[in-house]
Image: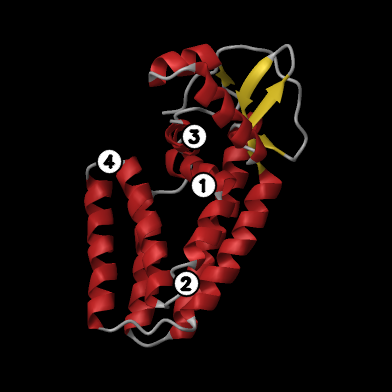
Amino acid sequence: MRDQTLETLRRRIISLELAPGEPLSENELAQELGVSRTPVRESLILLREEGLVHVFPQIGSFVSLVDLGRVFEAQFIREAIECASLADAAPDAAGIAGLRQILKNQWDAESAGNIEEFFRLDEDFHHELLRLAEHETAWNTVNSAKAHLDRARRLSLIDTRPVLTLIEQHTAIVDALEANDPQGADISLRIHLRDVFEDIKRIQATSPGLFSDGTVPRPTRRTIARLT
């Protein structure tokens, strides 16, 4: 029960359903999830260790702000692993067809305005690149490091970067792989991964309170409007 509660709360934080800075009530979460307070309390402790929740004595628990230091660290890890893996990627026709099917599904998600589905397919695309390079197990390392990065990416999909741009960047990577151009694929992937930094700058200009430089300001309990 705790593992299920942990996964649900983690997903809701990363998807921004629980927004940066939002207060968390053990009682309300337990009632909403249909569990006792114990798995909620244990999950919040584990999420605090991951940096996704902050607990303040006598005030309460809050969803953490997006930690820029963790974003930069995760981006470094992700770029190092994913770009290095491309050197070993030589997908056959079936591999290219699989990537292009993901691209088609991304177009369909964009046409339907389904950001949640697009984000899932974005994860599938990058996971598949590692699988085709026979480095699929490295995805666990990438995935475990990028919770704060994923929240920044979600914010970019809401506020700054058109989904079509992401699909075009994915297409450039696949085109280079199909043309047996690993250098072109590497350049396209690096550009794609690094664009999140420009997105963050634009989001900070309008919503600086969503981010943290590593310091944790003492909050006051209040209702936070959820992002849409």
Residue type for callout 1:
Asp
Q: Secondary structure at mark 3?
A: helix
Q: Is residue 75 left or right of residue 158?
A: right
Q: Which mark is residue 150?
A: 1
- Pointer 4 and pointer 3: residues touching (CB < 8 Å)? no
Residue 102 falls in image quadrant: bottom left
Q: Secondary structure at mark 2?
A: helix
Q: Is residue 20 left or right of residue 8?
A: right
Q: Quadrant of the N terminus?
A: top left
Whole-number angstrom distance, CA of label 1 to CA of label 3? 17 Å
Percent across and percent down for residue 79 are: 57, 66
How packed is label 1: few (under 14 Cα within 10 Å), some, or many (20 or more)? many
Residue type for callout 2:
Ser
Which is more toward the observer, 218 or 163? 218
Q: Is residue 20 visible?
A: no
Of marks 1 and 4, the one in the foreground: 1
Q: Which residue is mark 2?
A: 188
Whole-number angstrom distance, CA of label 2 to CA of label 3? 35 Å
How packed is label 4: few (under 14 Cα within 10 Å), some, or many (20 or more)? few
Whole-number angstrom distance, CA of label 1 to CA of label 4? 19 Å
- Pointer 1 and pointer 3: residues touching (CB < 8 Å)? no
Percent across and percent down for residue 73 are: 67, 56
Q: Sequence-wise, which precedes: disc 2 or disc 3?
A: 3
Q: Which residue is mark 3?
A: 6
Q: Residue at x 42, y 78 (%)?
A: 133
Percent across and percent down for residue 117 are: 30, 45
Residue 61 falls in image quadrant: top right
